[in-house]
Amino acid sequence: MDVYGLLGNPVGHSLSPPMHEAAYDELGLEARYVTFEPGRDALETAIEGADALGVAGLNVTIPFKQEALEIVAPEDLATRIGAVNTIDFSGSGPPTGYNTDAVGALRALRDHDVDLEDARAVVVGAGGAGRAVAFGLADAGATVAIANRTEPKARQLAEAVPRASGHGLADVERLLAEADVLVNATSVGMEEDATPVPADALHGDLAVLDAVYRPLETRLLRDAAEAGATTVDGAWMLLYQGVEAFEIWTGRDAPVAAMNEALRSRL
Ligand code: ATR
């Protein structure tokens, strides 16, 4: 029996257990996925303990993603993003840390036939999600304009991301006129009918990914659909960060349809 899990505080309403267990069921794997809620000062002890107990893999969420970077041996992309959301214990050395949020966003877009090579992307938000998406898009060959309410944060992030520029939200309308891809990586729209982008800045040549998944259809995605844009909801990004973690841990192709169904039936 392989044990996987999620480290966070709080982790109460996580959708990761049903999503991963659907994959184990589908492939007939003897595995379980459980949630762990260590104290905020107990992350290192928790990771060492999991390693000692033979836990196969862990996801990491708020508030531990940045601190986890200091405890595991991070892969290059996780180091650049500054956060680890997946730990693999299978090697003989120290556990390896990955950031699958970045690849999750890319796979969500590619799943909807969005071509990222040489695409002009606008990322709204420069927090944890914004950092992951910006580095991911740049690695995929896109030019990235990062726009954030607190403009200096966008400028600082843009200095670290290849081919990126940093902006305040006032520039979004102008940036979108020339863009192919828009990602909302802010919390605007979560459990509220609000959008970080004016509706009339959206157009039919855009693909719009909203990292918010509660509600699934945010005001931004409604506006985007009305403008004729391709829309990608936040459950796709959540799905593919999990798919990527599953594939790192097991070395097998994930049963994406089964994981997607388990996730969407709970949203
Ligand atoms: P996460 O890890 O989910 O990205 P975060 O690191 O707290 O969370 O970042 C939240 C992001 O949403 C930030 O880019 C934040 O902008 P600021 O850097 O200016 O705080 C953005 N955000 C949150 N509420 C917002 C609002 N009402 N309008 C615009 N941006 C908002």
Image (cartoon, rainbow, N blue to C red):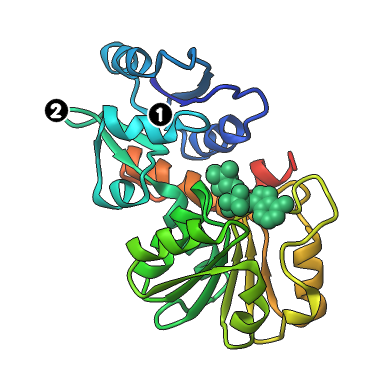
Q: What quarter of the picture does the N terminus occupy?
A: top left
Dot 2: what SS?
A: loop
Residue 92 is labelled as: 2
- Residue ranking furthest to the right: 193
Residue 257 is labelled as: none
Dot 1: what SS?
A: strand
Crowding near pointer 1: few (<14 within 10 Å), some, many (20+)?
Answer: many
Q: Is residue 164 left or right of residue 204?
A: left
Residue at the image point whose x is 42% and y is 41% from the top: 246
Residue at the image point whose x is 52% and y is 35% from the top: 20
Crowding near pointer 2: few (<14 within 10 Å), some, many (20+)?
Answer: few
Residue at the image point whose x is 53% and y is 16% from the top: 37
Q: Amino acid at mark 2?
A: Ser
Position in image of residue 62 (x %, y %): 53, 32
Position in image of residue 255 (x %, y %): 50, 48
Q: Where does label 1 land, which residue?
A: 58
Q: Is residue 233 left or right of residue 164?
A: right
Total labels: the figure holds: 2
Q: Nearer the viewer, residue 123 or 230?
A: 123
Position in image of residue 250 (x %, y %): 34, 39
Q: Is residue 236 left or right of residue 48?
A: right
Q: Amino acid at mark 1?
A: Leu
Position in image of residue 151 (x %, y %): 55, 61
